[in-house]
Image (cartoon, rainbow, N blue to C red):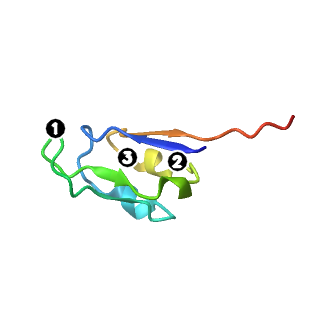
Amino acid sequence: MNRLEIDQDRCKACMLCIDVCNRKLLALSEKGLNAKGFHAIEQHEAEKCTACALCAIVCPEGCFTVYKEVKSTT
């Protein structure tokens, strides 16, 4: 299964990842502030993530780690 990890304490809420997500699965958290005083990014409907890694590419803070499932051919 594809998986996205977000280091919310590094996030500065620039929202570049929100704009680039083709599936619109990222949004600012409404839960509270992170260590830097920002509403960090959260992923919604994780099962719909294709692990395209566009969020990780555009993030200036390197907040994203993307894991893509490798399908076995055997």
Please identify the quadrant where the N terminus is shown: top right
Answer with left or right where residue 63 lies relative to residue 73.
left
The residue lying at 64 percent from left, 40 percent from top is 69
Name the residue tied to disc 3.
59
Give whichever of 21, 67 is nearer the camera. 67
Amino acid type at image mark 3: Cys
Q: Residue 34 appears at what percent x and percent y? A: 18, 43
Q: Residue 71 appears at what percent x and percent y? A: 74, 40
The residue lying at 21 percent from left, 58 percent from top is 30
Amino acid type at image mark 2: Ala
Q: Which disc, if any, is residue 63?
A: none
Q: Residue 50 appears at what percent x and percent y? A: 58, 53
Question: Mark 2 or 3 closer to N-term?
Answer: 2
Q: What separation in Å lies between label 2 and label 1 (alpha carbons)?
A: 24 Å
Name the residue tied to disc 1.
35
Amino acid type at image mark 1: Ala
Residue 17 position (above or below residue 12) = below
Give whichever of 57, 39 is nearer the camera. 39
> Label 3's element?
loop
Q: What separation in Å lies between label 2 and label 3 (alpha carbons)?
A: 10 Å
Answer with left or right where residue 27 lies relative to residue 25.
left
